[in-house]
Amino acid sequence: MKQLTLFLMLLSIMNAHAQLTYPVPEKGNTVDDYFGTKVKDPYRWMEDDKSAQTKDWVTAENKITFAYLNQIPYRAKFQSAIEKVFNYPKYSAPARKGEWYYFYKNDGLQNQSVLYRQKGLDGKVEEVIDPNKLSKEGTTRLTLFGLNKDGKYAVLGLSEGGSDWQTYKVRDMTTGKDLADKLDWVKISGAAWSGNGFYYSRYPAPEKGVSALSVKNENHQVWFHKVGTVQSADVLIYEDKNNPQRFHTAGTSEDEKYLYLTISDRGKGFDGNAVYVMDLTASGKTFKPLIKEVTNSHYNIVENTATDFILQTNDGAPNGKVISIPIKTMDAAAAKTIIAETTEPLQNTNAGGGKLFVDYLKDVTTRTYVYDFNGKKLGEVKYPSLGNGGNLSGHADDKTLFYVFTSFTVPPTIYKYDVASGKSSIFRKPEVAFNPDAYETKQVFYTSKDGAKIPMFIINKKGIKKDGSNVTLLYGYGGFNVNLEPAFSATLLPFLDAGGVYAQANLRGGGEYGEKWHQAGMLFNKQNVFDDFIAAGEYLIKENYTTSARLALRGGSNGGLLVGAVINQRPDLARVAIPQVGVMDMLRFHKFTIGWNWIADYGSSEKDAANFKNIYAFSPLHNVSATANYPSVLVTTADHDDRVVPAHSFKYIATMQEKYKGKNPLLIRIDTNSGHGASNTKKNIETIADIYSFIFSEMGVVPKL
């Protein structure tokens, strides 16, 4: 009977591989001229997400994709296995405001985490807000909860269906009731309280009927909102119409004496920021420059003392340093280095309990050191093992701080840190139904095309054979100074239990080894990222973890670009490719929503001929081959993704389906009422189950479920 079941599963898999008939979308005659090079864009009409033509095409594609996925016999088993292991209580670290401690909790499979509070650490727990009650499908997210100084009022940031757009409301924490305040078109913003109101950032309201995916993200403004008033009464604090693609974000010091304005200009290719300060106690309230010009150097205000502003920066220090600038003169030329650059890249500097907590990475694992405000080293936060920790922060008078430590086989564990003694103790440990001793994690360093040594983590069940037979999933990102650090994922466990091997490569373009590592994978060095990813796959094959027939590639957003570019350059490397919410049209990414923000990392097709030539050479959409034997492809995107708009994925898969002559499926899974990431737990689990099922099915391997 067991052999018959296996035969029927394999037969079902073979039937699923029958040649698919894809929709044949209309082709337009749009042609763009880039410095003398004519580039066709026949599916330009797909950029209009509201058109009936686009909607009909999406419906047809989803019909094919879900019919294909439905044929996979163990798809439901994967989803059930993921739900089972994911169904455990998940907590955030608590944060204090006065006598109250606030924290998030998800009972297990709730679509959204619920915000709670309690008086003291042992007080009665009471619910503050349950986002699951705000929408039928549980796709309304609580993106911000910002309390004022005395904890009487809170700003609630709400996002619908995975959108980056937020609506701000104000809640009276003494009554638990929302006030009439409602602020729209908020994006790239916090809530910086000052007295009876707060500063926030927004864009001008678009014309009525304009799609959120079509809104022009220009003229980012800072406003002040007084509690109890309507948005039309808000006071405009800052805008710069001459530089419409700049970000302007506001923050206030803990004592609410200073208002900080951070300005970035990534649309013009600058990777850093300027900082201006307003003394809110002064009679003439004007912004004065602390860091006057936007350059490629980053500045982040950490804290202010009675005499100095303390900032983290990489100016003249690619690995980062901490400086102080006198408040009296606000003269950056008089900056004093209080924590010098080291060989390890500085990730975060936070203040809490009257001390500085500085996080470094050493071979992609966290080290945290404690300093006073003069830069004297006081000690180290001791972590239980190699992994991902840090981000200790709090109020100046906090006696206890909290942090989360995790690694691939250590679920996020909350620790309580005693500021006076410097000792940590477990505050809350999650109960996950798995045995960490059954898995092993290895960090390796492999050689890329140009000789660079690239780190990679490999995770699998103990006892696997390195005989080339393992279904292996290689994940990468490689951009925007983003680190891929060790972190626990319950949704990965069913893949490992099914016999899979997971590899996470720390490609150049990230920040794992500081700004030089980032720069080695951006702009004209972007090809290094693709070479690093290809070399990672080749290493896994060479070391007999897998073969090309058992290798899958996965990445999201910038990582989706990565996967798309790599399978164009090396279609033989892997059997399956999963490009998720990818930046696939490198010639027009800056035309959509917030895309111009990525010019600092990618360059722009309109800047000059050299930039155009560089990105045209690797743009996934523009390098699809009519002769390559592509791996099986499952593209994922969502209708509410207003960060990397779904048109990227639409045009890409339509082009692949048009040109590819082989038998491997080229599918696109278009989620509804979701965004750049899954908008709720249910959608996240469904997507992951489909990815795992697709990988095993395309490789002709029955998972050990």
Image: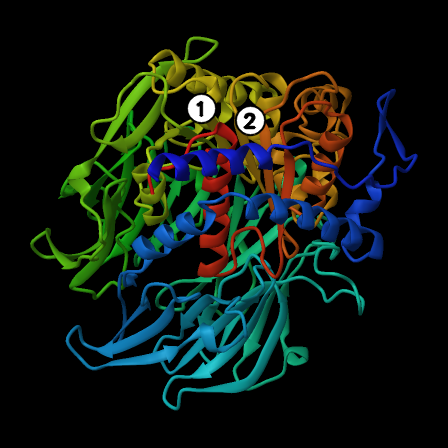
**Under tag 2, what secondary structure?**
loop
Colour scheme employed for the rendering of this structure: rainbow
Callout 1, which amino acid? Arg
Residue at 80% x, 67% y is 209
Is 398 situated left or right of 156 in this image? left
Disc nearest the viewer among 2 and 1: 1
Q: Secondary structure at mark 1?
A: helix
Relative to the observer, which residue lies in front, 339 or 385? Answer: 385
Foreground of the two, 194 or 698: 698
Residue 262 position in % (x across, y down): 52, 52
The crowding category of the residue bearing disc 2, from other C-alpha atoms within 10 Å (few below 14, some 14 to 19, many at least 20), is: many
The x and y percentages for residue 328 are 40, 54
Badge 1: residue crowd in 10 Å (few <14, some 14–19, many ≥20): many
Q: Amino acid at mark 2?
A: Met
Residue on which disc 1 sits: 550
Task: Decide if residue 260 is in sight here.
Answer: no
Q: Is residue 657 among what the camera can see?
A: yes
